[in-house]
Amino acid sequence: MPTTLADLTARTGLDVLDHLERQVSVPVVDGLQAQGDLIVVPAGLVPGLFLPDPGFFWDEVPPEGRELLRSASGGNPHTLIADGGGCLWASSVRDPEHLALGAVRTSRPAYLLHPEHGGTGLAPGTYLIRRQREGGEAPDRWHRTGRFRSAGHRLVAD
């Protein structure tokens, strides 16, 4: 039986806006996806990506979900949801574009939920979760604080 938006909201206690149909089946995709300002990229499509070794720096995603991103103004969260076991999250990744929030490794479907955008599903596999970047040039250097310095672009958080 397909997972619905109502299933995800019941499992997490999170709600979605009224314009979304709660009985709709959530699609499960194994390719590129976007959910607002969150971009999901299959790991095999990211040259130069460094993921931690299995068993190190990977945390199990709890059944109630793991918040991945919330706007700086306290807006709506993007939440990763999975059945207990079979889905791992690592925030210690090296992304050549420096946009990664982390990576997901799942052996069965996992889901992203957002109050405005609804749900989307990840087929079994490994994915890089990135933030959206708008405008300007690509980042070009590390700041002395260990954080990447912006070079005329901004990260988006809805």
Image: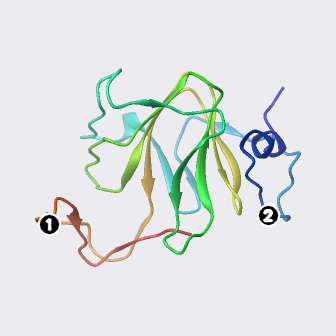
Q: Position of residue 141 (x, y in %)?
A: 14, 64
- Left or right side of 55 for 25: right
**Mark 2 highlights which residue?**
17
At horizontal 29% and vertical 55% (from top left) the residue drawn is 97
Callout 2: helix, strand or loop?
A: loop
Label 2 to label 1: alpha-carbon separation: 39 Å
Numbered label attached to residue 114 = none
Q: Is residue 131 above or below residue 123?
A: below
Q: Position of residue 150 (x, y in %)?
A: 25, 72
Residue neighbourhood size for the residue with mark 1, other residues' Cα within 10 Å, grouped as few (<14), some (14–19), many (≥20): few
Identify the image quadrant of residue 140.
Answer: bottom left
- Left or right side of 140 for 18: right
- Left or right side of 45 for 146: left
Residue neighbourhood size for the residue with mark 2, other residues' Cα within 10 Å, grouped as few (<14), some (14–19), many (≥20): few
Residue type, mark 2 in image: Leu
Q: What kind of colouring is applied to the model shown? A: rainbow
Q: How many marks?
A: 2
Identify the image quadrant of residue 135.
Answer: bottom left
Numbered label attached to residue 143 = 1
Image quadrant where one finds the N terminus: top right
- Left or right side of 79 for 146: left
